[in-house]
């Protein structure tokens, strides 16, 4: 799922070559994102377009030879002169008289040509890992290397015409891995290889051979001295494609600003998007007087302020976070709590009378992404999180704007992975104290993913460990929602520490946190009476959480109803579809009660006789605390539900685990009947988790 779709798409034709473009946003000023070399297309700017299009009209187009643009046959079509003319043609087609240019690699060279020779069309230029025809070059990128007859194609010998035509995918992987020379770049590499394989070796051979065609305009050092607009050059000092010295020379000759990314490779916009986006904001503020959205305002009355982020995947996080906020206000009565949240959590917050930050409306929907990733009761959660990177950087930037602008004293982040990742990656962006919550630590590879997933999960865990150990001051308080026994008896991966050794050294334990503990509602008989349940009736509730992922499970359970009713004719069955499942999409047997949303669902779960649920932690723990018998169906390939949650429930002796693939309607009915007649012997769940967590956080205020 993309963080934002274009508002307009189109094609412009030049010399019988069609170029595809997208327009995002409708701001008063334009930003033109110029494509780099044809080995990738405009999606290379996915970490910038959703965010900047909230303020600017952002135009991106696919260069000749990739994406949705044409792949002309003649070498001359790929000349630098044509590339420059293409940029102007896209500007004309979109009614853009002047723009702020953003160019990566070859796009940086094109931006500089436009700034020097078409200065009236350029308001500023932002170039990253820029290509240039001046300054030093890596020897393996020289023309003679490209044309050489090689006996073997190893390492940079793969930068060779013959190899591209014989085994282009091998070269593409080598080149993309060289772009991202930084460790922990697996997702960027994966994206780059995918985009590279949308073109072919024959096309790229033409693009390189076209470099021998001299343009009609000057591209020497004198060209850069002609640039009069503000220029920002961002360049990694470990760029294996375009040497850092080139970027430095371009900045010096043009009078531009140079920012060096220490240890950075060729594409800082993709590998370090949070820092680069912040640098662009600062540059536009300083050099063009375009205020950064997070420009800090003067401090008002000395009232303490907290920004609370609650994970939008389901409603359980929202319920526990509201409980923590209430306890925190008891300790700091004047504390203002603003919530940066998404649907469906915002509905819960509004019902509770909480204050939702206006930037919440700009957040890309993580729930929708999860729903689109899901199959039939199948969610590869680890891969879904990896593929959520575009949404996470867009949402992080809106978070950063909120923190920068509002002088918050404290950020409380309940599994806000974007905040934790980017503040650790760039500690200078941190502007408030951070209290971090999570109920699991560590990605666990699913067996279906094989060795490849095992490698990726280990790499992600290693990066997390390096972040926390390398920057211990980023998290001012790390809270594990649970206790030491809830930690999996596994390691984080090959050559990494054991979870049970590492986590206690870096986390405090709050015990489990619930929205409200069932002990606060009086006796079960009193609760049933208040909710309208008769003392002599048996009630079964089916619920699958706050996303649409559970729709197949509801349908499967509904098929078992006639079978159950034959054995238990008086069983009252209530199905809670949740806020993101259309009740009209369900075929409901006669007598089954169907509800779209129940605000006090936790009370109903405590009062019922049986529940059928997915494998989400919150609902399962609410049932455990209430002593309600339940069947739970972990989503296939969901590492958290199949490992972390299942381990915790086993510790409490709670729930009966079901396998969706083997759970036929007959099997579900049999298990429902059996569990209703089985004794309930669950371990008790602590009732003071929210208060304990609030006391830990209160120390930061």
Image (cartoon, rainbow, N blue to C red):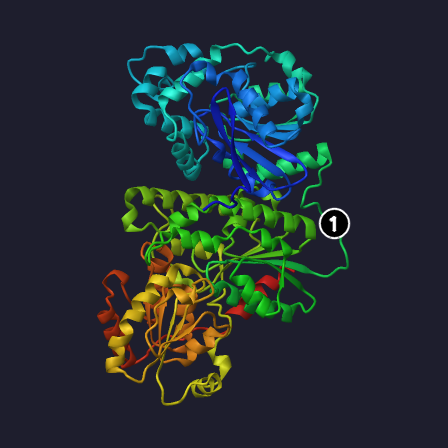
- The tally of labels here is 1
Q: Residue at x 42, y 53 (%)?
A: 370
Residue found at the very far bottom of the displayed protein: 536
Coordinates of residue 583 in the picture (x, y in percent): 42, 67
Q: Is residue 306 above or below residue 668?
A: above
> Which residue is more in the foreground, 571 or 609?
571
The residue tagged with tag 1: helix, strand or loop?
Answer: loop
Coordinates of residue 109 in the picture (x, y in percent): 56, 21
Q: Is residue 4 above or below residue 190?
A: below
> Which residue is more in the foreground, 644 or 24?
24
> Which residue is more in the foreground, 130 or 331?
130
**In the image, is 300 to the left or to the right of 119?**
right
**For the C terminus, which image quadrant?**
bottom right
Q: Residue at x 43, y 13 (%)?
A: 209
Coordinates of residue 255 in the picture (x, y in percent): 69, 21
> Which residue is more in the foreground, 363 or 509?
363
Q: Quadrant of residue 680?
A: bottom left
Q: Quadrant of residue 623?
A: bottom left
Categorize mark 1 by other alpha carbons within 10 Å: few (<14), some (14-19), many (20+): few
The answer to whether residue 236 of the structure is visible from this angle is no
Per the image, the residue denoted by label 1 is 297
Q: Residue at x 43, y 49 (%)?
A: 385
Q: Is residue 701 above or below residue 284?
A: below
Q: Is residue 693 above or below residue 54?
A: below
Q: Residue at x 23, y 70 (%)?
A: 667
**In the image, is 659 to the left or to the right of 368?**
left
The answer to whether residue 398 of the structure is visible from this angle is yes
Coordinates of residue 225 in the picture (x, y in percent): 67, 16
């Amino acid at each position: 799922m993309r963080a934002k779709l274009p508002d307009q798409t189109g094609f412009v034709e030049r010399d019988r070559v069609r170029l595809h473009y997208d327009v995002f946003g409708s701001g008063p000023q334009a930003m033109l994102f110029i494509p780099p070399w044809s080995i990738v297309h405009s999606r290379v700017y996915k970490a910038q377009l959703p965010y900047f299009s909230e303020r600017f009209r952002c135009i991106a187009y696919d260069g000749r030879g990739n994406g949705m643009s044409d792949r002309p046959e003649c070498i001359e079509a790929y000349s630098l002169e044509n590339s420059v003319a293409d940029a102007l043609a896209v500007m004309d087609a979109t009614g853009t008289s002047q723009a702020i240019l953003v160019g990566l690699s070859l796009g940086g060279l094109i931006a500089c040509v436009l700034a020097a020779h078409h200065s009236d069309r350029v308001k500023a230029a932002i170039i990253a890992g820029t290509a240039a025809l001046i300054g030093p070059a890596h020897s393996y990128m020289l023309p003679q290397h490209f044309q050489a007859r090689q006996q073997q194609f190893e390492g940079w010998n793969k930068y060779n015409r013959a190899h591209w035509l014989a085994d282009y995918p091998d070269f593409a992987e080598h080149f993309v891995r060289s772009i991202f020379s930084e460790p922990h770049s697996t997702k960027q590499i994966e994206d780059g290889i995918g985009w590279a394989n949308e073109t072919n070796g024959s096309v790229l051979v033409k693009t390189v051979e076209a470099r021998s065609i001299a343009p009609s305009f000057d591209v020497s050092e004198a060209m850069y001295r002609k640039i009069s607009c503000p220029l920002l050059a961002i360049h990694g000092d470990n760029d294996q494609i375009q040497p850092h010295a080139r970027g430095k020379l371009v900045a010096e000759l043009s009078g531009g600003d140079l920012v060096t990314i220490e240890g950075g490779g060729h594409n800082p916009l993709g590998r370090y998007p949070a820092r680069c986006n912040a640098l662009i904001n600062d540059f536009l503020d300083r050099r063009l007087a375009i205020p950064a959205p997070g420009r800090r305002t003067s401090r008002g009355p000395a009232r303490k302020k907290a920004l609370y982020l609650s994970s939008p995947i389901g409603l359980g996080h929202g319920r526990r976070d509201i409980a923590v906020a209430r306890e925190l206000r008891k300790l700091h009565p004047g504390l203002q709590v603003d919530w940066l949240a998404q649907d469906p959590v915002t509905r819960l917050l509004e019902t509770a009378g909480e204050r939702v930050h206006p930037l919440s409306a700009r957040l890309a929907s993580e729930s929708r992404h999860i729903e689109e990733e899901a199959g039939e009761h199948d969610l590869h959660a680890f891969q879904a999180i990896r593929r959520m990177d575009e949404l996470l950087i867009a949402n992080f930037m809106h978070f950063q704007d909120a923190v920068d602008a509002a002088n918050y004293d404290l950020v409380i982040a309940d599994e806000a992975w974007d905040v934790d990742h980017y503040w650790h990656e760039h500690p200078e962006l941190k502007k408030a104290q951070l209290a971090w919550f999570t109920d699991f630590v560590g990605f666990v590879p699913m067996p279906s993913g094989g060795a490849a997933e095992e490698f990726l999960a280990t790499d992600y865990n290693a990066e997390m460990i390096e972040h926390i150990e390398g920057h211990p001051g980023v998290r001012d308080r790390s809270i594990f929602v649970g206790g030491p026994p809830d930690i999996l008896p596994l390691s984080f991966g090959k050559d990494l520490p054991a979870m049970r050794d590492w986590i206690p050294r870096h986390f405090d334990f709050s015990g489990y946190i619930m929205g409200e503990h069932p002990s606060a509602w009086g006796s079960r008989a009193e609760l049933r009476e208040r909710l309208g349940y008769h003392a002599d009736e048996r009630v079964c509730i089916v619920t699958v959480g706050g996303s649409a992922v559970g729709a197949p499970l509801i349908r499967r359970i509904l098929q078992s109803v006639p079978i159950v009713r034959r054995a238990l004719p008086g069983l009252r069955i209530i199905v809670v579809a949740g806020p993101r499942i259309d009740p009209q999409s369900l075929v409901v047997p006669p007598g089954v009660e169907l509800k779209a949303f129940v605000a006090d669902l936790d009370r109903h779960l405590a009062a019922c006789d049986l529940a059928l649920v997915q494998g989400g932690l919150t609902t399962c723990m609410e049932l455990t605390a209430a002593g309600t018998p339940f069947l739970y169906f972990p989503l296939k390939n969901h590492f958290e539900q199949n490992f972390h949650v299942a381990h915790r429930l086993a510790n409490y002796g709670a729930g009966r685990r079901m396998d969706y693939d083997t759970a036929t309607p007959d099997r579900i009915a049999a298990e429902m009947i059996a569990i209703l007649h089985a004794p309930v012997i669950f371990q008790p769940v602590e009732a003071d988790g929210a208060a304990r967590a609030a006391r830990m956080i209160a120390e930061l205020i």
